Structure formats: C-alpha cells, structure tokens
Image (spheres, grey):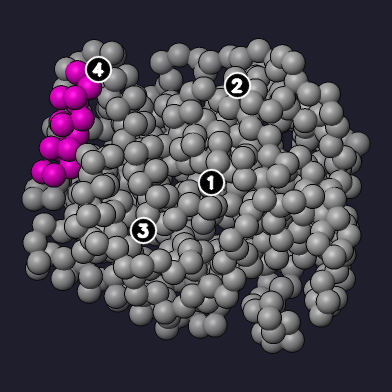
C-alpha cells in the first residue's frame, strides 16, 4: 500500500518553522507569520522557507530560570573535548585540501556570501566535488565567534534562514556572533536535487494521499515510481550522497573554513538530527550546541512515524478545542465532533475537490487540503486563520486553505515552487535510515489509525523510499557523543512534528545532554515561546552558562 504523503509531511519538517516562528528584536521578539497576513490574504515579509488573523492572546510569558546551573561551557568557537584518537580541530587524513580552503566572502543580499567546496563522496576525496552556498551576517558588536544555524527540513535553505538573522536569534546573540547559514548538499543553491518540474510536482502533491481501492493504489504507486525514476535520472551521483552523516561532515569542513576550533551551533527540528550526528562524529569539536525541537535519532522508522502521527493528532485536538472554545466552530460543537467533522471534510475533498480561482492547481484536492491543515499545527497563532479557511472552504471558497497549503510546500499561486525542499526531503530521508524488514502493511496502517484517526492514513506508508535506488554508506548506531561539551536539548510538550518524548530521549542518549522544556503548543520553542526559554538559551550561547538540566518553562 503506497501512501506518498506520509513520506513528504512525515519526519522533522521545519519547512514552516522558519516562517511561522519568526523572531524580531525589540520589546516583543516573538512574532508569528500571522502578523504578516493582510486581510486580503497576501503574505508580507514571508521568509523563503520555514514552521509556524491575529493571535487571540499574547504568547505566554515565563520567568527567568530559577536555580539554573552556574557551570560554564567554553564557547565562542573554543570548547569541547578530545575526539576518539584526536583533538579539537584536528584535520581528518586525506581531507587537508578541503579543511584548509579559505572562504572568499563577497557582499550579497542580506549579508556576505561564499561557497565551500566539499567532496561528493568522502570515501573518494579526490573525486568529484560540489559547492555549498554560504551566507554570513557579521556580528553587530564585539565578536566572539561564529554561530552556524540550520532550520531543519530536510530540504530547507540555511542561507535563507541566516539571511533573516534578526528573526532567528536575539539581538544580543546577533551582537556577538557572526550568524552563518549553509544550504546542505542537494538543497536550494547547493547542487539541488530536482526530480519533477513544477507541473509534475503539482500533480504529485495534489494526488490522492489515501487510495481507497486497488486501482487507486496502483495509480499512486505508479506516480511514486515515476518520481523516483526522475530523481535517479536527474541527480546523478549525488543522489546517494545527501545523507545526514555527509551533511555533518560538510559542517566540520565549514567549521575549519570559518577558522574555529570548535563549532557553535543552533539547529531546529531536523537540524537537531544534524547536530546530534555531528556531535557523535566530532565530539571534540562541539562548542555551544542548542538543539530545538529535537529528533530522537535512535528510533526505528516505524516508531518515528507513529510518534509524529500521534503528535499531529494531539495538536489538532488542541486546535479543535480552541476552535470550539472560540464559539461558532465550523467543525463541530465539541472536540470529538470537531475531529469527526475535520475527517469528513477531508474525505469529501477526495470525492469532491473544491474548484479554485487564481491558483494554477485548479482545485483543492484532499492532498492539498491535508497540507493546508497540517501547516497550522506548527504554531497555535495560526489556528484562527485555519478556522477562517475551513469555514470558507465549506462554503465553496478554498482560496485561504490553498494559501496555507502553498505556505507549507513553498509554492506560489501561479504554480512556481520557490525551492526544491519538497524533493530534497525525500532524498535525505530515504538515505538516513538503516534497512528494516518489510512491514505488514495492513498492521502498520492499523497502528497508525489507532494513534491518529485523522492523520494516520496519510502518514502510514513508505512512499518513495520503498523504491529508492541508493542506500546510505554510513548509518550511525550510537549517538552518545562521549566527550562532547554540554548540549542543550529543547522540547515542547505539545509539539506536533517533533514530539516531546523525542527531546527527552535525545537528552538521555547524549552523554552531555541537558533537557530544557517548554510547556506549550507548536513546533520548537526558542524565539516563539517565553522569556524563560529565550533567556536560558541566550545565557548559554553568550556566556556559556549551562541551563539547569530538567528546567521547565
């Protein structure tokens, strides 16, 4: 049974986090994308990619951390512990040419740009290379080092993320750190993997995500096979070399090119997977690491999918409760009837897509509708927008719900995809998991629908990975990162995309993990939650003050 959507919206997608969890300097640094929506539905200042009209209340405020640890972690590009058989900043044998390269920074939009040369295959460093796109926003004051940032995905541009440095980190952090982003291999400006053209992607994403009979399953399977064949034909050698292990190795080359002995890093969502992988490979080179919206890298593919399905179901129930509490909810009069109403709405889209004017898709299908709902789960500030969109769609106007779907996939109304993130995510995910026994598809579907009656059927399949022609060269089986400096892991209790249990597990797995908890809704916490979280993170990045393990905000 092939369920493509599961392979696209599953995993740690930070695709909307950058947009929906934007940060600004000033009295209130927490601002969601809802504040950039006009009445007419135009989005002003939308970041190029990212997760999260007006909010019904101000974001919750928390106090400053109480009883926080006074221990200091060395930082500013200078902390960590020895790696296995090596020391901080050591150059791996055979990679000297890459580690010793100098970056030629040039002024560009939003900062300074450069490229970093890395081998396609680290086992063949004398073979073909690719250029990774970089962007740096220089520290505004007394510089203490470089802070590399990654928004997740997989498939989201780190260049676009760093370009919005004032929204990514606090003004205090930007004052003292160069904010550096890079497009991971296969993403955006770094040898992007592009399989389908825009029109084909519309057909792919908008197609039936929940086949109901053998004929529909066969059509879905054929479309998936066409996508995989296009990836294989267009991506060449790189198709087998976009794993997270290779991205982490690229990041160590970047550290050296930035002239830092240790790496200071802020990773969100899938970016936490990159960070945990880096820490395991290069524990001596770990500086001040903050992993927000954490992924548990030790989970099986099935358990990870089930966890995320349950997370989206929980977030949606919280949304429906909010909708009911606001009065006149278009879905129902209580949570259970509202969830049933949402399922009925999506099911009806399968049989009766809603015609669209002003969008190249032509109609809102069940596939597009799922994305329109899912995107709003990343930030509770978007819930009123979703309610309006659903009410309008029930009345035959799907413009706003399609608008929300377009935010998720990074698409304009005229059918232009502004990045390759919806294709790169598949390429990375299919390489990042060790081979597992073929599942009993009926049993898997039963498990998914049990934990997530609304979204289970959309998330329960292998999709393109069932046919992927490449396997990863290296899959890690240990993420303890023995000897690494303290690594701050942040979990949000009702995070739909990266459930809180994953943050607990990652903090326990890392030998130096420190768990920081935000009790709230939405995806990730730093910059979109409260002062307690923000102050703890800033104190660590700026001063090396390690938060109290287990601090809850």
Q: Which residue is mark 4?
A: 324
Q: In this rendering, which labeled residue sits more in front, label 3 or label 2? A: 2
> Whole-percent x and y of residue 139?
83, 41
Q: Which residue is labeled 3 in the image?
A: 7
Name the foreground residue: 197 vs 538: 538
Q: Earlier in the sequence, mark 4 or mark 3?
A: 3
Q: Left or right: where does residue 481 sit relative to residue 436? A: right
Which mark lies nearer to you, 4 or 3? 3
Q: Secondary structure at mark 3?
A: helix
Asked whether the residues under the numbered discs 4 and 2 touch, taking CB atoms below 8 Å apart as contact, a structural biologist would say no
Q: Which sits earlier in the primary sequence, circle 4 or circle 1?
A: 1
The residue lying at 86 percent from left, 46 percent from top is 79
Q: Residues within 10 Å of mark 2 (few under 14, many from 20)?
A: some
Mark 3 or mark 2, earlier in chain: 3
Vertical relation: 133 (above or below) 492: below
Q: Compare marks 3 and 1 and give the one earlier in the sequence.
A: 3
Which residue is at 34% across, 24% downward? 318
Disc 1: CA contacts within 10 A as few (<14), some (14-19) or many (>=20): many
Q: Quadrant of residue 301?
A: bottom left
When asked about the image quadrant of residue 225, the answer is: bottom left
The reply to whether discs 4 and 1 touch (Cβ–Cβ < 8 Å) is: no
Disc with the residue nearer the chain's start (1 vs 2): 1
Eye-nearest disc, 3 or 1: 1
For residue 295, the mark is 1
Mark 4 or mark 2: whose residue is earlier in sequence: 4
The span from disc 4 to disc 3 (Cα, nearest Å) is 31 Å
Q: Which residue is mark 2?
A: 552
Looking at the rendering, in which quadrant would you find the C terminus?
top right
């Amino acid at each position: 049974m092939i369920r493509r959507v599961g392979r696209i919206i599953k995993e740690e997608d930070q695709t909307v986090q950058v947009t929906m969890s934007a940060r600004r300097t000033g009295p209130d640094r927490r601002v969601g994308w809802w504040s950039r929506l006009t009445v007419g539905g135009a989005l002003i200042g939308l970041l190029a990619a990212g997760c999260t009209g007006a909010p019904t209340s101000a974001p919750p405020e928390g106090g400053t951390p109480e009883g926080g640890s006074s221990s200091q972690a060395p930082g500013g590009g200078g902390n960590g512990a020895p790696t296995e058989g090596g020391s901080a900043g050591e150059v791996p044998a055979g990679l000297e040419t890459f580690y010793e390269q100098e970056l030629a920074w040039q002024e560009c939009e939003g900062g300074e740009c450069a490229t970093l040369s890395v081998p396609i295959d680290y086992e063949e460093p004398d073979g073909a290379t690719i250029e990774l796109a970089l962007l740096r926003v220089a520290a505004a004051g007394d510089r203490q080092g470089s802070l590399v940032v990654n928004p997740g995905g997989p498939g989201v541009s780190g260049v676009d993320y760093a370009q919005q440095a004032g929204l990514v980190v606090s003004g205090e952090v930007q004052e003292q750190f160069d904010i550096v982003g890079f497009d991971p291999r296969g993403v955006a400006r770094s040898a992007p993997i592009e399989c389908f053209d825009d029109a084909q992607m519309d057909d792919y994403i908008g197609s039936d995500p929940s086949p109901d009979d053998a004929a529909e399953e066969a059509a879905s399977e054929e479309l998936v096979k066409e996508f995989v064949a296009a990836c294989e034909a267009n991506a060449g050698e790189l198709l087998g070399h976009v794993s997270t292990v290779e991205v982490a190795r690229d990041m160590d080359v970047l550290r050296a090119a930035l002239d830092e002995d240790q790496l200071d890093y802020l990773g969100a969502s899938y970016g936490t997977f990159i960070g945990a992988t880096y820490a395991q490979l290069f524990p001596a080179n770990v500086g001040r690491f903050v992993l927000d919206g954490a992924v548990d890298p030790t989970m099986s593919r099935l358990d990870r999918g089930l966890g995320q399905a349950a997370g989206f179901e929980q977030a949606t129930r919280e949304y429906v409760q909010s909708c009911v509490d606001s009065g006149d909810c278009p879905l129902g009069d209580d949570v259970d009837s509202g969830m049933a109403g949402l399922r009925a709405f999506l099911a009806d889209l399968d049989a009766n897509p809603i015609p669209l004017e002003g969008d190249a898709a032509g109609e809102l299908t069940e596939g597009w509708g799922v994305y329109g709902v899912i995107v709003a789960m990343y930030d509770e500030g978007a819930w009123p927008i979703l309610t309006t969109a659903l009410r309008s769609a029930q009345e035959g106007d799907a413009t706003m719900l399609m608008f929300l779907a377009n935010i998720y996939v990074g698409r304009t109304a005229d059918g232009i995809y502004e990045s390759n993130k919806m294709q790169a995510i598949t390429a990375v995910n299919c390489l990042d998991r060790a081979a597992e026994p073929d599942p009993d598809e009926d049993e898997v579907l039963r498990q998914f629908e049990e934990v997530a009656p609304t979204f289970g059927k959309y998330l329960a399949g292998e999709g393109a990975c069932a046919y992927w022609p490449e396997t990863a060269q290296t899959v890690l089986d240990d993420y303890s990162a023995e000897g690494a400096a303290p690594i701050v892991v942040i979990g949000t209790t009702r995070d739909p995309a990266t459930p809180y249990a994953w943050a607990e597990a990652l903090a326990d797995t890392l030998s130096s993990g420190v768990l920081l908890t935000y009790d709230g809704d939405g995806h990730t916490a730093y910059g979109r939650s409260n002062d307690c979280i923000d102050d703890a993170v800033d104190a660590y990045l700026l001063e090396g003050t390690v938060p109290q393990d287990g601090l809850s905000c």
